[in-house]
Amino acid sequence: MARPTPLSGFPELLPRQRAAELAVLDSLRATFELHGFASIETRAVEPLDQLLRKGESSKEVYTLRRLQAEPDTDDSSSAAGLGLHFDLTVPLARYVLENAGRLEFPFRRYQIQRCWRGERPQEGRYREFTQADIDVIGRDELSFDADVEVTEVMAEALSRLPLPAVTLQVNNRKLIDGFYRGIGASDPAAVIRTVDKLDKVGEDGARRLLADQAGLDGAQVEQCLALARISGTDSSFAARVRALGVEHPLLDEGLGDLVRVLDAAAHTQSERFTVVADLKIARGLDYYTGTVFEGRMATHGDLAICAGGRYDTLASDGRATYPGVGISLGVTRVVAPLVARGLLDGSRSVPSAVLIALPSDDDRPRGRTVARALRARGIATEVAPSAAKYGRQIRHAERRGIPYVWFPGAEGAVDQVKDIRSGDQVDADADTWMPPAADLRPHIISPSTRESAP
């Protein structure tokens, strides 16, 4: 068989790298569950008319069909118009509608799952990727406290990971919509879509677009840009907004909401993680109605690693409307570029914390007995593949990143275990010995921060 050619946009990780990704996923799950979010998993496919309802380009949706399907048969997937989901929000809306009678509202869910998107592959943009979403969904109404909560949860989840510096930018659509109405903009939605492009087109480009596409005069354009320049990590940003002299009830409401969100996330602020009110963040999609989020990592340039916001009409069945608020984190978008640059790795390539050394091949049954005793207490253990010299068995453990080597004692003698990193060797009993908690499973190593997280 000829050597296979890698497929662009479908990243695969080596075992040590995959261990780092799994540690990221485990940390996210733990944080989400600490806040009471329940896990769900939805099917990989959805009807095409549902997938395209969000405004997604049909060029980016992968359709599903059997290779030998007959176009005119009822069981043809292509005839049914099925496609792979490109995010987890569309499946969530369908899931809520189908199960509304069996769910308790507000429905708090997290979902970590694969998605597929047919875009041009490049660093940080993939055709197959993992997303981690949290959402709170209400029936007919949803308290603003949910906006505050999802901000706090995602902020905690990111701040617990030893990643390069992350900034979670937060804004409020009511604030900017009210501001644009307050300056007399006739089409606030057009202004929002233009301001959302500010980082790409720059201020000069935004001036032209605001005049040409949103119909603003020179003074209105400068007020929009002045608002977009405001940012801050505490509530003092609100005074700078007030100083612009614009008044509107929506502006007042949105400003108060954004201050509450920022105050709630204040405890997560650190040197490597910042929550900032950034009034140029707009999220150009029209279905956002309140809080909006974008998260960026220092190593990823302009690429957002997470995004989301408040949407007051996630779905409706004609009798009830289901508002929600949520954030999506691109796990693959975070992990794959860091792995490629050597900024993220796993502490070892195998789950094993202990290697049972073999004095001879005749000792293999005794080695297996020790391994079973350790595994019974949750210590991942493997037996050496051969009874080579102890030096070679230790090097085998080193290559795999296994921190401890267990030496069965001679008949009637006590077993010993060696930490091959420090060289410390002590007497040990398989029924009582326990390694430090940090050594039980592989953990994340982030050379850029010189830190690791168990």
Image (spheres, helix red, strand yellow):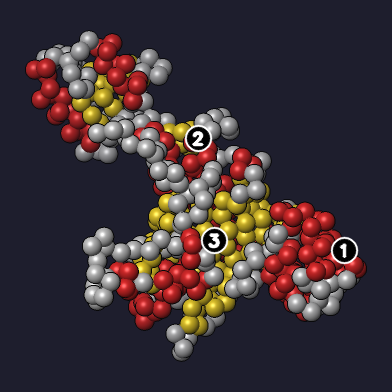
Q: Alpha carbon of mark 3 to alpha carbon of mark 2: how far? A: 25 Å
Location of residue 181 (image quadrant): bottom right
**SS for callout 3:** strand
Q: Which mark is residue 222?
A: 1
Q: Quadrant of the N terminus?
A: top left
Q: Residue at x 28, y 11 (%)?
A: 391
* Res 192 visible: yes
Q: Alpha carbon of mark 1 to alpha carbon of mark 3: how far? A: 31 Å
The mark nearer the N terminus, 3 or 2, is 3
The mark nearer the N terminus, 1 or 3, is 1
- Of circles 3 and 2, which is in front? 2
* Res 166 visible: no
> What type is the residue that disc 2 sits on?
Ala
Q: Residues within 10 Å of mark 1 (few under 14, many from 20)?
A: some
> What type is the residue that disc 3 sits on?
Ile
Q: Residue at x 76, y 70 (%)?
A: 213
Q: Work out whether residue 139 or residue 114 is closer to the camera in this orientation and state it.
A: 114
**SS for callout 1:** helix
Q: Position of residue 259 (x, y in %)?
A: 72, 64
Q: Which mark is residue 327?
A: 3
Q: Is residue 441 depicted above or below 354 in this figure?
A: below
Q: Which mark is residue 340?
A: 2
Q: Position of residue 202 (x, y in %)?
A: 77, 54
Q: Is residue 21 depicted above or below 424 in this figure?
A: below
Q: Is residue 186 depicted above or below 19 in this figure?
A: below
Q: Is residue 214 depicted above or below 118 in this figure?
A: below
Q: Position of residue 102 (x, y in %)?
A: 35, 78
